[in-house]
Image (cartoon, rainbow, N blue to C red):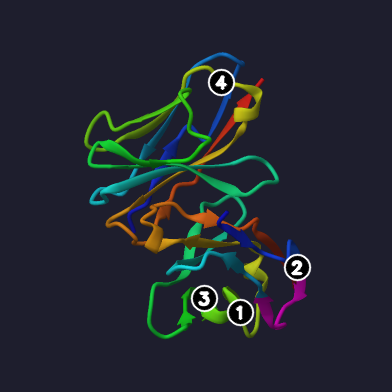
Amino acid sequence: EPEVTQTPSHQVTQMGQEVILRCVPISNHLYFYWYRQILGQKVEFLVSFYNNEISEKSEIFDDQFSVERPDGSNFTLKIRSTKLEDSAMYFCASSPFYGYEQYFGPGTRLTVT
Amino acid sequence: AQSVSQHNHHVILSEAASLELGCNYSYGGTVNLFWYVQYPGQHLQLLLKYFSGDPLVKGIKGFEAEFIKSKFSFNLRKPSVQWSDTAEYFCAVNPSTSGTYKYIFGTGTRLKVLA
């Protein structure tokens, strides 16, 4: 069964550094998403992406964040200058159609020191 | 603000016991509803979903959920749990009439099943 994959599984970075989290959505899916879960808190929506542009973003997704689909398979989340409070598990998801269920990847644990 | 509540944060059951996990949401429009499960060390997997139609939804691994619109609830049930059901369970809501793509998640319920 096709799965969403994410790399790396764990990323440690210093405050102020840029990080790029990578995701490979399921190949025939059209909608892509990033969520995050700070330890002990809810899974929170960050952004959705369709047709090579952001379709929706949350208030968390400020100018420090960006997303890109650089080729036909990868979907990336970039954090320009990481803060301690960016430490969280970041989940990528994809869905084939609008409103269809989302398929989640295993997550990347980001630790900012 | 739209929110999802899961009232049980930790549940411990013995094998063969019945399970019911509560999920309530605050949104007056049409919603799509989901339950996801996360086994230790694994990713979120869809257990079941509700878009429309029969409010009693059957999912994988013997789970079912009932949508009660008047109570804004979508509770998850299983008549007889197994040790392998030990996992974290997340309720998620997509407020579809607002045109949003996002899921709003509950805080999750950690279920431990004792053998």
Going by the numbered disc 1, the residue's amino acid type is Arg
Asked whether residue B65 appears in the rendered view, the answer is: no
Q: CA distance from mark 1 to mark 2?
A: 13 Å
Q: Residue at x 55, y 46 (%)?
A: A44
Q: CA distance from mark 1 to mark 3?
A: 11 Å
The earlier-in-sequence mark between 3 and 2 is 2
For the N terminus of chain A, the quadrant is bottom left
Q: Is residue A108 magenta?
A: no
Q: Residue at x 68, y 78 (%)?
A: B19
Going by the numbered disc 2, the residue's amino acid type is Val
On screen, residue A90 above or below B14: above
Discs 1, 4 touching: Cβ within 8 Å: no
Q: Which mark is residue B61?
A: 3
> Is the same chain shared between marks 3 and 2?
yes
Q: Which residues are magenta?
A: B11-20
| Residue A56 drawn at (x, y percent) | 38, 43
Q: CA distance from mark 1 to mark 4?
A: 41 Å
Choose mark 1 or mark 3, whichever is in front: 1
The earlier-in-sequence mark between 1 and 3 is 3
Choose mark 4 or mark 3, whichever is in front: 4
What residue does disc 2 label? B11
Q: Taking A74 as reference, is B98 left or right?
A: right
Q: Which mark is residue B77?
A: 1
Q: Residue at x 59, y 57 (%)?
A: B3
Q: Main secondary structure of the magenta part?
A: strand
SS for tag 2? strand
